[in-house]
Amino acid sequence: MTNEQIIFNNRVELMDKGIIKGTGNKITVENEEGEKFELEEPEQIHTYAGWKALNRQVKKGEKSVASFMIWKHTTRKPKEKDEEPQEAMFQTKAFWFTESQTEAIAQ
């Protein structure tokens, strides 16, 4: 499963539990059996770094609305000059925040 799928599935679950809100937009989703249905799109969640990349700062004292595992890609530098860089994938726990927990970064 890709990070995008992991995040979307967790957003839907968080919305069903009432932890995050919906956007009001309807999206068509296909389940594992190939059945299509409409559901309300959950609000966006991002990590601290994700919001930072979108020019937003998580407010001081805010606690994450969720934490779950995602895939992370890394490249290790070679120890010797003639070695190739080593790429690896591993799972890491990430902490997620909603937009209402952030504020715009003054420029």
Image (cartoon, grey):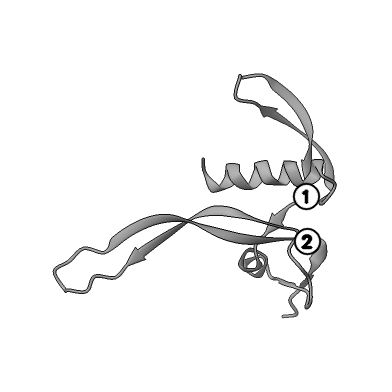
Q: Nearer the viewer, residue 4 or 106?
A: 4
Percent from the top left, x then y, of residue 26? 80, 34
Label 2 sits on residue = 99
When asked about the image quadrant of residue 32, the answer is: top right
Image vertical order of residue 67 relative to residue 107, above or below: above
Q: In this figure, what is the number of numbered marks?
A: 2
Residue 107: percent from left, percent from top: 72, 80
Q: Amino acid at mark 2?
A: Glu
Residue position for label 1 = 43
50 vs 84, left or right, is right
Q: Nearer the viewer, residue 11 or 52?
A: 11
Q: Amino acid at mark 1?
A: Glu
SS at badge 2:
helix
Q: Residue at x 28, y 61 (%)?
A: 86
Q: Is residue 56 above or below residue 69?
A: below
Report, in whole angstroms, how far the alpha carbon at label 2 lies from the one at label 1.
8 Å
The label number, if any, that marks residue 22 in the structure image: none
